[in-house]
Each structure stands twice: as C-alpha cells, then as structure tokens.
Amino acid sequence: MNQHPIFWFADGNIVFQAGDTIFRLHKSILFMHSQALETILTLPSGIEGDGENSNHAIFLEGISMDEFEHFVSWVYHVGSATQQHTIASLTAILKISRLWMIENSILWAIANLEQLDLSPAHKLELAHKYNIPGWIPLTAQALIFSPLSAISDDDVCRLGLRAYSIIAKACEMVECERKTIAAVPPGLSLDPDPSCPPNQHQHCREAWIRFWWHKVARQLLHPTKPLALSGIIDYIANQPHPDGLRVACRERYVGEIIEGGGLHVESEIVGGATAAIETYFASL
C-alpha cells in the first residue's frame, strides 16, 4: 500500500484508500464541503477503527487513485491558481461529488465541463452516468443531425447499442424527410395567383422549379451540412429573387411550404428520440 506523496497529512485524522494508494486527510475540510459525508462518517460503520489509520483505511469502491487525487486536489485547492482542468479531472470531481452529494461541486464541475470540447456522445454518456438531464436534448440533436459516419467506434461504446440504435433510426428518418421534400418543388399543383396572367404562370412555374432544384434542394441534400427543414423559409427569403418568377407566385409557393406542415418534422423526430433515450436511461 502506497501513501500519497502529497495528500498524506501528518495531522490528518481520516484515511481513505483509492486503488492501491492511501490518503490521510482532514475531516473538518471534507465535512465543510459535504454534510452528507459528515453524516455517513459519524454513523457507526461496524468496523473497528474504520478510517483511523493505514491498516483500517476506508476503501473507495469504484474510485481510482487518479480520480480521488483530482477530487482531493480540488478540495484542498492544490495548484488551483495555475491548473487547467481537464475532462478527466472535472469528471472525477463530478463523480465523487455526486457520490458524496456536494451540490456546489456538482454545479461547478458541470459548468466547467460545458466549456470543454466534449463530443456529443461523450456528453450523453456523462449525462446518463451523472444525472445531467439538461444535456440530453441538445446532445441527442447534435448526434441526429450529424452523419452516422462521424460517430466513431469509441462514441458507439459510450452510447451503448440501444442509444446508438435510437439515434441511427432518427438520423434515417430525418434524411428521408429531407429527401422527400427536396424531391418535388412544393406548390406546383396550385392555381395561378389572380394577379398572374395564365400565359405568364408557366414561366413562374418553371422559374420556381429551377430555383428549387438549383438552390433549396441542393442545400437540403448537402452531404455534410444539409439545410434544416426549419430553415427553408429563411433561406429562401435571403436568396435573390428568381428571374421570371412573379412576387405573388413566389409568396404562394412559400405559403404552400408553410401550410404543408413539414418544417417542424425534424424537431418532432428529435423530440421522440430524446424521449426514447431518456426512457432507456431511466430503465437502467
């Protein structure tokens, strides 16, 4: 058994074991952070001398030496002035803070993890492990709107087969909806606007078809950064007015897109997938 080179205090009064390393710390400092830990450690454990010395160290099941070292470094503010917290250190602080119900540490770790470049799959894994429900909708959406090829083998392991299956099916549904809408310019069956002469409307119709295929459909079918269905109207509004298309006819075509009700189908798919993931996580 190895004593930690830094966190073995001569005046410490409680000993923990993480991995094959023992730490002698101060109850008063730990209790200042966690009332739950104080309650736990003041109750009789049934083990004589529990935590009093190296021969009776309190073993931290499921916590590695590195994880406990990160946590204790944060509690004692060792190197805090210059230390750049990493994903590993913040995750360790979050993990042990959850175990010992240290609410301010939990919020601090989550806030700092949000500043780091975590992949959506990693965030979803942490959301499940450490009960961060607010992360699930946005991370699920990011995964669904990314190509499946961008999800690495490591990401699949983080997600688990069931969550990955939910995301893959939602990806396929979104892609199908985009292809369906891109395939046929909307509004072609509409009657001409009353202000559009019959001999002109065929030109409007052809101009709209060209605009849809050359602009909107290409954006919807972009292989890496497809246009979201909910962004179609803004995209059209920001494009130069197509030659040969009367303004009134364009407005009727755009109105048909809105009335078709397909602009929000992506959010409905994401919402359904998010709910399925949340239900799955709750069942574990």
Image (cartoon, rainbow, N blue to C red):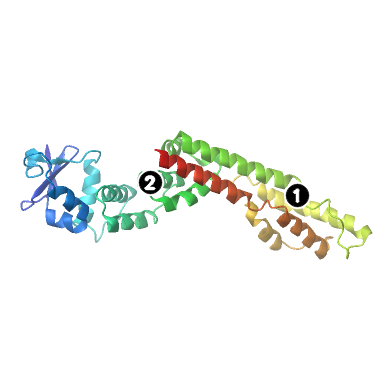
User: 9 or 27: which is nearer to us?
Assistant: 27
In the structure shown, which secondary structural element does the residue marked by tag 1 occupy? helix
Q: Are marks 1 and 2 in contact (CB under 8 Å)?
A: no
The vertical placement of 25 against 233, above or below, is: above
* Quadrant in the rendering for residue 193: bottom right
Picture coordinates of residue 45, whole percent (x, y)? 13, 42
Picture coordinates of residue 269, whole percent (x, y)? 58, 46
Looking at the figure, which quarter contains the N terminus?
top left
The vertical placement of 254 against 213, above or below, is: below
**Amino acid type, mark 1:** Trp
Please report whichever mark, 1 or 2, sits nearer to the chain's N-terminal start: 2
The residue under the point 45% across, 49% down is 136
Instruction: Quickly name the residue at label 1.
Output: 213
User: 84 left or right of 11?
Assistant: right
Evaluate whether residue 110 shows in this view.
Answer: yes
Label of residue 126 in the image: 2
**Amino acid type, mark 2:** Leu
User: 183 left or right of 144?
Assistant: right
Looking at the figure, which quarter contains the C terminus?
top left
Neighbour tally class for label 1: few under 14, some 14-19, many 20 plus, Cα within 10 Å: some
Picture coordinates of residue 103, whole percent (x, y)? 29, 56
Evaluate whether residue 226 shows in this view.
Answer: no
The vertical placement of 245 against 42, above or below, is: below
Neighbour tally class for label 2: few under 14, some 14-19, many 20 plus, Cα within 10 Å: many
The residue under the point 17% across, 55% down is 31
* Quadrant in the rendering for residue 168: top right
The residue under the point 25% across, 45% down is 67
Label of residue 233 in the image: none
